[in-house]
Image (spheres, rainbow, N blue to C red):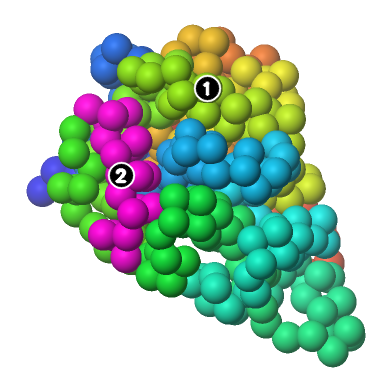
């Protein structure tokens, strides 16, 4: 039985091999050419939150963002899987106030902040789980903003047939070069529709997003504005000290990226019109950013890629904080 995956990273403890992460990855250009591939480029899976930069296009293109007075911080948050740090929570709450809505309008379920320290602060203040703490609440605010702007109901924006979802599918279809509405569909963790597609299709769409290779000036401008926002506020995508922000800074903003659940990450290289899609077969978040950084090094986009890969993965430590192992990227040549 053949597998669509190849070994990508090793976990070593005391120098001894303990675990292996397998996966697949594709690099493509805006002309639709696959330039590099590890594993099977036709493997179909869910990019999950890696689709958020595409979902945010209609928010800007429609004029909804400007009508609501949104800043680049809001635009980045619309693309984010945030950690519910204080500044991110404040942005979401202020955004809902602009819309005249409460958190009950959000389809995403109640959650807690990502870090234990922030969770403890909520409990100490007498708080509880909240929909604004959900990592996807910025994306949901984007869909609410778009819905209000186009005169569509704010309720039901999670329905694939809702006008706001149809605008997203139309924009994504252009970048894919095929009908996104016909793709296999599931439900994401936040309650919105989740699309599944081949790895090579994702890489090609990412390359076209990077190059803003679209037919209209309005859509091209919208994509460029999202790129500028992510470049300016990379910490908003996840949180302070995140591997996402580290990679954006290490490439001086040449490379933008968005991680997704279950071991997925998508990269965008605007000045070269390249797209990168990475998926770890076991769904691990561990190692995917190291693999991504290594691919950037092979593309000549990241100096000291090995050091950056080690930095974004970190060491494996015991309960006393002592280093006992680490992640070693083992991407085939």
Front one among 250 and 8: 250
Q: Percent x, y for residue 153?
A: 42, 66
Residue at x-position 67% and y-position 32% = 229
In the image, taking residue 37 as reference, residue 75 lies left or right, namely right
The magenta span reads 159-177
In the image, taking residue 26 as reference, residue 146 lies left or right, namely right
**Relative to 97, residue 128 above or below:** below
Q: Percent x, y for residue 289?
A: 56, 39
Residue underneath mark 1: 221
Task: Report if residue 147 is visible in the image.
Answer: yes
Main SS, magenta region, reads helix
Residue 244: quadrant of the picture: top right
Q: Earlier in the sequence, mark 1 or mark 2?
A: 2
Alpha carbons under labels 1 and 2: distance apart? 18 Å
Residue 82: quadrant of the picture: bottom right
Residue at x-position 64% and y-position 61% = 99
Q: Is residue 171 magenta?
A: yes
* Residue 100, numbered circle: none
**Which residue occupies the extreme left position in the image?**
1
Task: Report if residue 293 is visible in the image.
Answer: no
Residue at x-position 34% and y-position 36% = 171
């Amino acid at each position: 039985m053949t597998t669509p995956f190849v070994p990508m990273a090793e976990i070593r403890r005391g120098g001894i091999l303990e675990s292996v992460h397998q996966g697949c990855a594709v690099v493509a250009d805006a002309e639709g050419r696959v330039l590099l591939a590890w594993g099977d480029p036709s493997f179909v899976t869910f990019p999950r939150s890696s689709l958020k930069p595409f979902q945010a296009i209609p928010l800007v293109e429609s004029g909804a963002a400007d009508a609501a007075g949104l800043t680049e911080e809001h635009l980045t948050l619309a693309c984010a899987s945030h950690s519910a740090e204080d500044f991110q929570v404040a942005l979401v709450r202020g955004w809902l106030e602009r819309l005249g809505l409460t958190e009950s309008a959000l389809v995403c379920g109640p959650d807690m902040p990502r870090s234990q320290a922030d969770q403890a602060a909520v409990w100490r203040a007498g708080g509880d789980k909240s929909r604004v703490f959900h990592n996807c609440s910025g994306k949901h605010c984007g869909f609410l903003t778009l819905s209000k702007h186009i005169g569509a109901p704010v309720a039901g924006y999670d329905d694939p047939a809702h006008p706001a979802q149809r605008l997203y599918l139309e924009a994504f279809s252009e970048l894919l070069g095929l009908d996104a509405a016909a793709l296999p569909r599931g439900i994401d963790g936040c309650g919105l529709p989740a699309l599944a597609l081949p790895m090579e299709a994702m890489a090609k769409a990412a390359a076209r997003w990077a190059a803003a290779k679209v037919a209209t000036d309005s859509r091209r401008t919208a994509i460029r504005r999202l790129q500028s926002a992510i470049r300016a506020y990379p910490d908003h995508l996840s949180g302070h000290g995140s591997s996402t922000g580290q990679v954006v800074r290490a490439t001086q903003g040449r490379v933008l990226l968005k991680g997704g659940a279950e071991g997925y990450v998508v990269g965008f290289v605007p000045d070269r019109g390249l797209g990168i899609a990475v998926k770890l077969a076991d769904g691990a978040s561990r190692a995917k950013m190291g693999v991504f950084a290594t691919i950037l090094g092979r593309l000549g986009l990241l100096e000291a890629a090995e050091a950056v890969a080690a930095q974004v993965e970190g060491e494996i430590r015991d309960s006393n904080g002592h280093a006992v192992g680490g992640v070693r990227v083992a991407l085939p040549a």
